[in-house]
Amino acid sequence: MGLAASQGRLLLLTARKSDLEYRAQEISQRRLILATELETVSSKYARATANRQMKLTRQVKMGEANQTQTVNLTYKNLIDYGRNEDENGISDYRIRNARGQVVVSDVSELPKTAADTGYSGDGINVKVEGNRAIVSGVDASGNDVYVEYVVDSKISDTSETENYFQEGLRNGKFIIEQLVNTDKTGNQDLGNTGEVTGNWTSVSWSGMAEVQDNYYTDDDATAQAEYQSASARVQAQDKKLETDQKQIETQHKAVETEFESVQKVIQSNIENSFKMFS
């Protein structure tokens, strides 16, 4: 092979090497994307099989008798349960957030009067400002009161899984408070005043007999089927890319071997030419 022909062949091999290296990088990138996709699928499956759901067991009046009913623990179900057939509609439960604010799901739930707050006494004032309300003053027991109510519409989420309200209870974002020592429970000694002097006390949801927190398994079968299907698809694609990558590596090695061989021929031709003219 002459010098010119060898040089031309070397240029072709150089181009071929570059093309194979580019294809190898492209395949590596696609395999990396598949690995990320498989990780996402696995994480979704893990969440689906590890999710939990809180249930609220309550007594519901059906005609003349009470019946036990178990429902998903939502903000609304808890508040309704706490009303306990109170003619004034005041719930025995309310929700505070980590900032100490009382949370409601809608502007319509903001207290308008002292009677809406669960506090008693003529010294309670309520001021509504847009999406919040300020309750302040002195209750019937002589205690100073200052509470800020705010609206968080997401608390009304009623989804079966990954419930915003339930997750908030688990991670401490929301705290349940219960109104105790009121005439609604029969524990209040009204004395001669006839006043209701209730107190709001924090309660742990895990200590409430009415609340159960168990694994939610209704979506496990669907999650498993989706995971197996997606995993098989990703692994099949990755296997094909792996085969393509090995073929490219074999071709690249052959091209590299020929490249080195042509380089030696060129070098030999150059050395022979210099010897001829020396």
Image (cartoon, rainbow, N blue to C red):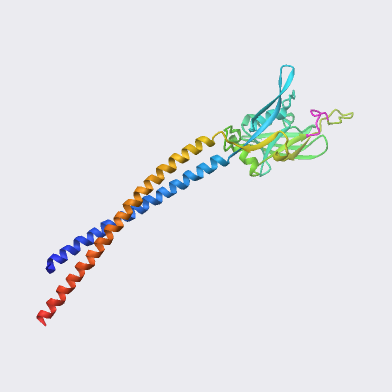
**Image mark count:** 0
Highlighted magenta segment, given as a residue range: 180-186
Q: Residue at x 30, y 54 (%)?
A: 247
Q: Quadrant of residue 56?
A: top right
Whether residue 21 is visible, yes or no, is no
Is 171 or 263 nearer to us in this picture? 263
Q: Residue at x 47, y 38 (%)?
A: 226
Q: Position of residue 108 (x, y in %)?
A: 63, 29
63 left or right of 43 in image:
right
Residue lying at the far top of the rendered structure = 63
Whether residue 44 is visible, yes or no, is yes
Q: Residue at x 23, y 67 (%)?
A: 260
Q: Name the quarter where the N terminus is drawn.
A: bottom left
Q: Quadrant of residue 259?
A: bottom left
Q: Quadrant of residue 141?
A: top right
Q: Name the quarter where the C terminus is drawn.
A: bottom left
